[in-house]
Image (tube, helix red, strand yellow):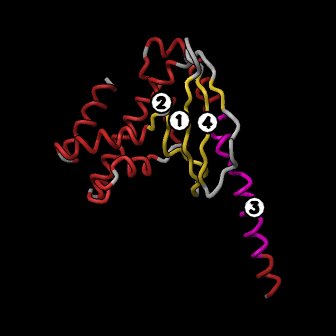
Amino acid sequence: MKKIIACGLLFVLLSSGVLWAAVRSPQDVVQETSARMLDALRQNRDTLRQDSSRIYALVNQIVLPNFDFELMARWVLGRNWQQATPEQRRRFADEFRTLLVRTYAKALLEYSDNDIRVLPLANSADNNEATVKTEAQARTGSPIPINYSMHLNSEGWKVYDVTVDGVSLVTNYRSTFASQIRSNGLDTVIADLQKRNAQASR
């Protein structure tokens, strides 16, 4: 009996070791995702010139798996998330995700001909949190700093905020949506997001 228990514990430990060993570092996640995305953009350059909306599929396939959109939506809504119904949360998270895909896709098209350099981590990832700093080489002028705030969950390292040239995406949207919700209510904000996303996809 003891041998069975010992073997069981050993199996669990080995399995856990394999799982943790398989977790990519936050820097590797950003590096590999950026490289894959830029490579896909360059390979599909002619197709994207004819129909730029096709980039959304590439972003969904390559970039989205590395983002924690539920956490981002929760932080963007702030106190309004707690007051929202489960259905409102789901609808907002879905539309906010689509908005981010569109925003991120447009930005990527601007840098498809340039490299994105991932900088060394200033500090090792601690307490399941890390910030990966990158530089996107603009066509003219100095490189633009793009930093990814990440946390470690059961699926690996996920991005929960992006700061571009010192401006936090989450903070920026939180301020915008808070003002709109105070004036018009959450349902109106969700409906407006849905309308804008639908128009952009045409």
The secondary element bearing badge 4 is classed as: strand
Q: Position of residue 54 (x, y in %)?
A: 45, 23
Q: What label sits on residue 4 in the rendered view?
A: none
If you read the primary sequence from the N terminus, does the residue marked by circle 1 or circle 3 appear first? 3
Q: Which marked residue is nearer to the observer: mark 1 or mark 4?
A: 4
In the depicted view, which residue is nearer to us: 121 or 36?
A: 121
The residue drawn where x is 80% and y is 87% is 2
As shown in the figure, which amino acid type bears the numbered disc 2? Ala
What residue span does the magenta drawing correspond to? 8-31
If you read the primary sequence from the N terminus, does the residue marked by circle 3 or circle 2 appear first? 3
* Left or right for 136, reference 55: right
The residue drawn where x is 55% and y is 32% is 146
Task: Look at the image and tell me in which quarter the C terminus lies.
Answer: top left
Q: In this picture, is 20 found above or below 150?
A: below
As shown in the figure, which amino acid type bears the numbered disc 3? Gly
Distance (Cα) linking label 3 and label 2 = 34 Å
If you read the primary sequence from the N terminus, does the residue marked by circle 4 or circle 2 appear first? 2
Which residue bears the numbered disc 1?
61
Q: Position of residue 20 (x, y in %)?
A: 71, 57
